[in-house]
Amino acid sequence: MAMIKGQTVILYDKQQTGTDPIGNPVYSETAEEIADVLVVPVSSEESIQDTNLYGVSTVYWLFIPKGDAHEWRHKRVSFFNANWQTVGEPIQYIEENVPLRWNKKVRVAHYE
């Protein structure tokens, strides 16, 4: 029986570093590799529902390993040589009630 393996994704975190001459915020991004993330395609029904709800077509679910404390709401991530944007609220389950290594999930849409 084969073991389920996650992959490494890059999570980008934006920090405000100042303002431009007309007062708009200026940000810098830091990248952090997150290991053992499962990447699973969303169903076509979920993608249609997300298009109606959020205005974007989601493509994948990311299942986040237990113990991860990163903020996944409204973040840019990279995997499969492409950039993605997390959509909606991350869903977190009670760690002790989940038999596998992942207890949080978030949807992503293609980011251009």
Image: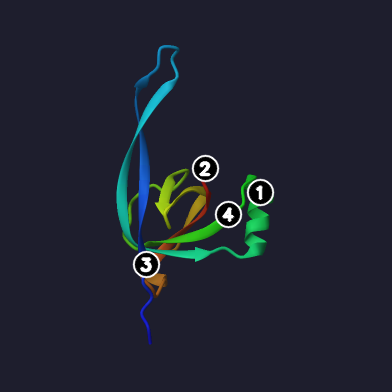
Q: Where does residue 66 sit, x and y in percent of width and height?
A: 34, 63
In this rendered view, identify the residue nearer to me: 99 or 109.
109
Point 49% across, 65% down: residue: 40
Which residue lies under the disc numbered 4? 58
Q: What element carries label 3?
A: loop
The kind of residue on which mark 2 rests is Glu
Point 41% across, 51% down: residue: 78
Of the two numbered discs 3 and 2 in the rendering, the one whose residue sits closer to the viewer: 2
Q: What is the distance, in whole Å, between disc 1 and disc 3 at their CAs? A: 28 Å
Please report whichever mark, 3 or 4, sits nearer to the chain's N-terminal start. Answer: 3
Q: What is the distance, in whole Å, between disc 2 and disc 1 at their CAs? A: 20 Å
Q: How crowded is mark 3: few (under 14 residues within 10 Å), some or many (20 or more)?
A: some
Q: Where does residue 7 sit, x and y in percent of width and height?
A: 36, 64
Of the two numbered discs 1 and 4 in the rendering, the one whose residue sits closer to the viewer: 4
Q: With respect to residue 100, does 48 lie above or below?
A: above
Q: Is mark 2 on a helix, strand or loop?
A: loop
Which residue lies under the disc numbered 1? 53
Q: Residues within 10 Å of mark 2 (few under 14, many from 20)?
A: few
Q: How crowded is mark 1: few (under 14 residues within 10 Å), some or many (20 or more)?
A: few
**What is the number of the mark on residue 6?**
3
Please report whichever mark, 2 or 4, sits nearer to the chain's N-terminal start. Answer: 4
Q: What is the distance, in whole Å, between disc 3 and disc 2 at their CAs? A: 24 Å
Which residue lies under the disc numbered 2? 112
Q: Is mark 4 on a helix, strand or loop?
A: strand
